[in-house]
Image (spheres, rainbow, N blue to C red):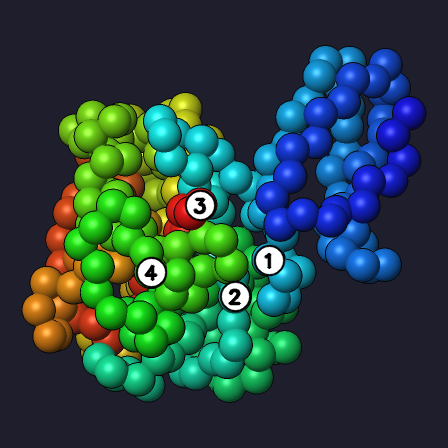
Amino acid sequence: MIKNIVVTAVILLLTFNTNAQSDTIYLKKNVNIVGKYHVNSKDETIINVLVDSRDGNIYKVIKIGEQIWMAENLKYLPNVVSSSMGSETKPYYYVSGYQGTNVSEAKIHANYKTYGVLYNWPAAMNGDVSSTTNPSGVQGICPCDWHLPSDAEWIQLTDYLDTSVAGGKLKEAGTTHWDSPNTGATNETGFTALPGNYRDEEGVFVTIGEDCDLWSATEKDDNYSWFRNIHYNDKDVGRNNFNKEIGFSVRCVKD
């Protein structure tokens, strides 16, 4: 019977087999419980997680092809501003629906808990320069030993899954978060893309439910950078570029 497991590594694999009908795995950082998983199965259960040492946030991790991805949007929030603030050069961090500047308040907002943080491109890059290589070599806003994927790394992912249907394989299934019809969504990869949408060029948080937009570490030019778009009524993954002041979500890749 497993009672406590203390996390000592940034990424770990927990494997166990139990006949218990109800048991709990506790994830600890130092002496603080930073997460727990309830076990209600007689079968072996494997949990892959990343613990961000900067704030204690825990993320599910999945392997797709030869890449290891976060299976949740990044939540690291060093500061926060309202959607009215925008810049192509200065880093800004947003929580969709929150219009204040208090980090503690922003972190209890329902959209932070579900969809994470929206970053303009300077915030996502965290002072690094654009990269076209695979891997990108750009840590950006990602935790240590993880990095912001380049356009080439996104291409690797979508080519592996077949770009024309990759969106369906990456999207959370059903309409709990996605608007109907959530075309082709199976989430067979475990990536669990969610429609947190974005902060647009007019300083408005676009309605949640329609789009999952994720930055790359590759700029198109001085003003625009490449990103990936997954839509509620398509099963593909769009490759587009947008102004660097836009607030998009971030997924990180293991170095």
Per the model, the C-alpha gap separating discs 4 and 3 is 11 Å
Whichever of callouts 2 and 3 sits on the residue coming sooner in the sequence is 2
Q: Nearer the viewer, residue 185 or 148?
A: 148
User: Could you tell me which secondary element the residue under label 3 belongs to?
Assistant: strand
Per the model, the C-alpha gap separating discs 3 and 1 is 13 Å
Per the model, the C-alpha gap separating discs 4 and 1 is 17 Å
Which label lies toward us, 3 or 1? 3
Per the model, the C-alpha gap separating discs 1 and 2 is 8 Å
* Disc 3 packing (10 Å; few <14; some 14–19; many ≥20): many
Instruction: Identify the residue at image location x=52%, y=71%.
Output: 77
The disc at residue 52 is 1
The disc at residue 254 is 3
Whichever of callouts 1 and 2 sits on the residue coming sooner in the sequence is 1
Whichever of callouts 3 and 1 sits on the residue coming sooner in the sequence is 1
Disc 1 residue type (three-letter)? Asp
Which label lies toward us, 4 or 1? 4
Disc 4 target residue: 138
| Labelled pair 4, 1 in contact (Cβ < 8 Å) | no
Residue 215 x %, y %: 28, 58
Disc 2 target residue: 76
Tell me if residue 6 comes above or below residue 183 in the rendering: below
User: Could you tell me which secondary element the residue under label 2 belongs to?
Assistant: loop
The disc at residue 67 is none
User: Could you tell me which secondary element the residue under label 1 belongs to?
Assistant: loop
Tell me if residue 151 comes above or below residue 160 in the rendering: below
Instruction: Identify the residue at image location x=24%, y=82%.
Output: 89
Residue 52 x %, y %: 59, 57
Per the model, the C-alpha gap separating discs 2 and 3 is 16 Å
* Disc 4 packing (10 Å; few <14; some 14–19; many ≥20): many
Tell me if residue 220 comes above or below residue 147 in the rendering: below
Quarter of the image with the N terminus is top right
